[in-house]
Amino acid sequence: MAIRLIHAGLGGWGTDWEENALPPVREIERVAWVDSHEPTLAKARERLELPADRCFVSLADAFANVEADAVLITAPLFAHVPLAIESLEAGKHVLVEKPFAATLAEAKGAVELADEKGLTLMVSQQYRHYPAVRKAAELVVTEAFGPVGMVRLDFRKYSNRAKTGASRHYDFPHPLIFDMAIHHFDLMRMILGQEPARVFTQVTDPPWSKFRDEASAAITITFERGTVVSYRGSWISTGEPTFWGGEWHVECEHGELHFVSREGGSSGDASDELHVLPLDGTAEAVELDHFAYHGRSAGLLAFANAIETGEEPETSGRRNLPSLALMIAAARSAESGKVEEVERFG
């Protein structure tokens, strides 16, 4: 039996979920749609041809009119935790877009409530669900090329074309760190199998940046066992664009792993590549596993499986807290200009 899902948040990204991520997953059945902004709701209803009697301006209205098991939250960041708490209080499982929350206190409160209610609370960290990152994590954990030394990671895109004030992206809080680097921070934890300890952020925005907060930065993250990651990210790079998952160089004792991940359209098609360069050899391509689903669709399947089995998902709210803590510490360092400690858990 499919998980009956209410989808809350039907703006541009929420609509993309409806058009690309949700349809392939037969284990999920959408039973209602919610957006508190009536013009946005009306626009989505028309574009997606949604039934009017299943579209609501509040979760409370949806809960009162349809039977549901879970809620998908793709609303703006400020609404993530309030909508999650409302859903959990109503006895619904929750899948929420990244970043989970703007503060650790908010996130911890939601995690505690989910535990109290015995419900699944999961964060959509979709970049984990691609072949190259899974294979890289496997090679690192098995020390196929020895222990890890230095890691270099680059992300480059250009999102600076619109006129000043004409793009909502320009006004996002911490658009690099909150909107994009959270993906890469989460992948660092997954691939290295370590938790972050300290972070230093140097904002590198040029004079022509139209963003209010940092759009580019050089970030150094030190992990618990001493591994250092050098991360350079930019929404305003005029260099060659990278894949969305970034361009990775993982230096190990006996060679380097080089991989790129998550490119293509919103449908989540994978075009990942991973090469190994042995210390005394030539670069070789590594065959990657085939995935039936990628990205958000794979995350939806993991969410459905967690609800069915009662097992804690890989990106549960609790397990996502260290990624969120690194994001928040990196933003704090961007403002303070100092090395910041990353909050640790358990």
Image (tube, grey):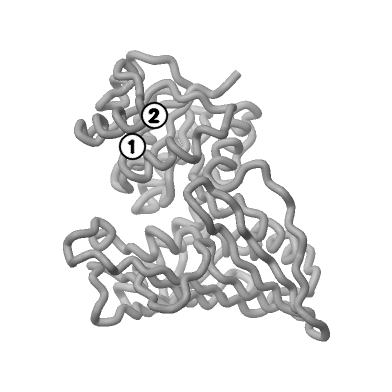
Residue at figure coordinates x 49%, y 44% from the top left: 123
Question: Mark 1 is on which residue type?
Answer: Gly
Question: Considering only vertical position in the picture, is 293 above or below 140?
Answer: above
Q: Quadrant of the N terminus?
A: top right
Q: Nearer the viewer, residue 193 or 33?
A: 33
Determine if residue 263 is in view. Answer: yes
| Residue farthest right in this picture | 280
Horizontally, residue 238 falls left or right of residue 187, namely left
* Residue 132 percent coordinates (x, y): 66, 60
* Residue 232 percent coordinates (x, y): 46, 76
Q: Quadrant of residue 3?
A: top right
The mark nearer the N terminus, 1 or 2, is: 1
| Residue that label 1 marks | 9
Residue at figure coordinates x 35%, y 42% from the top left: 80
Question: Considering only vertical position in the picture, is 144 above or below 118?
Answer: below
| Residue that label 2 marks | 87
Q: Nearer the viewer, residue 23 or 245?
A: 23
User: Which element is circle 1 on?
Assistant: loop
- Mark 2 crowdedness (10 Å alpha carbons): few <14, some 14-19, many ≥20: many
Q: Quadrant of residue 148?
A: bottom right
* Residue 85 percent coordinates (x, y): 37, 34
Determine if residue 318 is in view. Answer: no
Residue at figure coordinates x 39%, y 75% from the top left: 237
Are discs 1 and 2 less than 8 Å apart at CB? no
Q: Nearer the viewer, residue 100 or 169?
A: 169
Residue at figure coordinates x 37%, y 39% from the top left: 15
User: Which element is circle 2 on?
Assistant: helix
| Residue farthest bottom in this picture | 280
Distance Cα–Cα, label 1 vs label 2: 13 Å
Question: Mark 2 is on which residue type?
Answer: Ser
